[in-house]
Image (cartoon, rainbow, N blue to C red):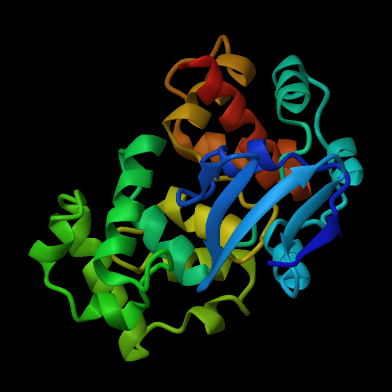
Amino acid sequence: MKRARIAAPDFNLDLTLNSGQVFHWDRKGNGYAGVIGDKPLFVEQQGDALLAPAGSENLVSRYFALDHPLPEIYRTFPGDPAMTSALEYCRGMRIIRQPVWECLATFITSSMKQVAHIRQMSQAIRRGFGAFPAYPTPGRLARAGEEQLRACMLGYRAKNLLATARLVASGAVDLVAIGKLDDDEAHARLRRLPGVGPKVANCVLLFGYGRLKAFPIDVWIGRVLRENYFKRKRNVTEKRLRLFSAAYFGEFGGYAQQYLFHRARMEGR
């Protein structure tokens, strides 16, 4: 297969695909096999370029957000020790632009699970209900039974995923329309969906809708924030963490969050 060479300065493919944003890319030799939407691809990095199938240049560039101005984004990061360390460790990581439904469904199943477990569930759902390796459509999942989804290791998450799939498939929820709302309203609308709390809603805003200010707070990030920015404070609420993060990390808080998250996760292994 003929391959195209795509300029990818300030980019690290390994970091990006292994940072807990997506869960379905497999290391194969010098590159990664995966799927963007319903298109299977093999992508390999060579220096400041990506090698991908000819004809997929625009798809790959958009998916890996090669247009994001990383040097400009880095200049907005605060200069505290935690953020500086995270930047040094994660330099070149980009926020992937995921298909919105795939992102929403995947993070609904992520609740209280580690990355390895989320990956296993994602692969099981793709094999069981999708045109593997593509993620199944809302309509396909809407026709499934809860027990079939539980067989994909989802546990109680199966009920939430099924209910949300049925809402989207029926048209009762329009993900395109949600994407046209401002951040606060989109967040509120997403939170009405079964299995979607503040963290999952922010993940969908960040990874699905490309709202780079969104700052998901999970156990890892909550710990990072409390240990580095509230050292002498007790009983810091999640609401206070959300307000602090929005003000302190600014318009590219999603990038700051992902760098802090990945650095903390690697340190915790």
Residue 216 in view in this figure: yes
Q: Image quadrant for the N terminus?
A: bottom right
* Residue at position x 31%, y 83% in the image: 139
User: Which residue is most to the front?
Assistant: 1
- Tell me the residue at 59%/75% (across/down): 179
Q: Is residue 32 left or right of residue 125?
A: right
Q: Is residue 229 left or right of residue 28?
A: right
Res. 205 in view: no
Q: Is residue 158 above or below residue 85?
A: below
Q: Quadrant of residue 259?
A: top right
In screen coordinates, is 69 left or right of 229? right
> Left or right of 166: which side holds 2?
right
Nearest the viewer among 83 and 8 is: 8
Picture coordinates of residue 32, whole percent (x, y): 59, 48
Q: Residue at x 22, y 54 (%)?
A: 157
- Numbered circles on residues, count: 0
Which residue is at a point 57% across and 25% down the rendered structure image?
225
Residue 180 horizontal/vertical position (percent)? 63, 79
- Residue 87 position in % (x across, y down): 76, 27
**Percent position of residue 186, x then y:** 54, 69
Q: Is residue 8 above or below residue 16?
A: below
Of 166 and 181, the residue lying toward us? 166
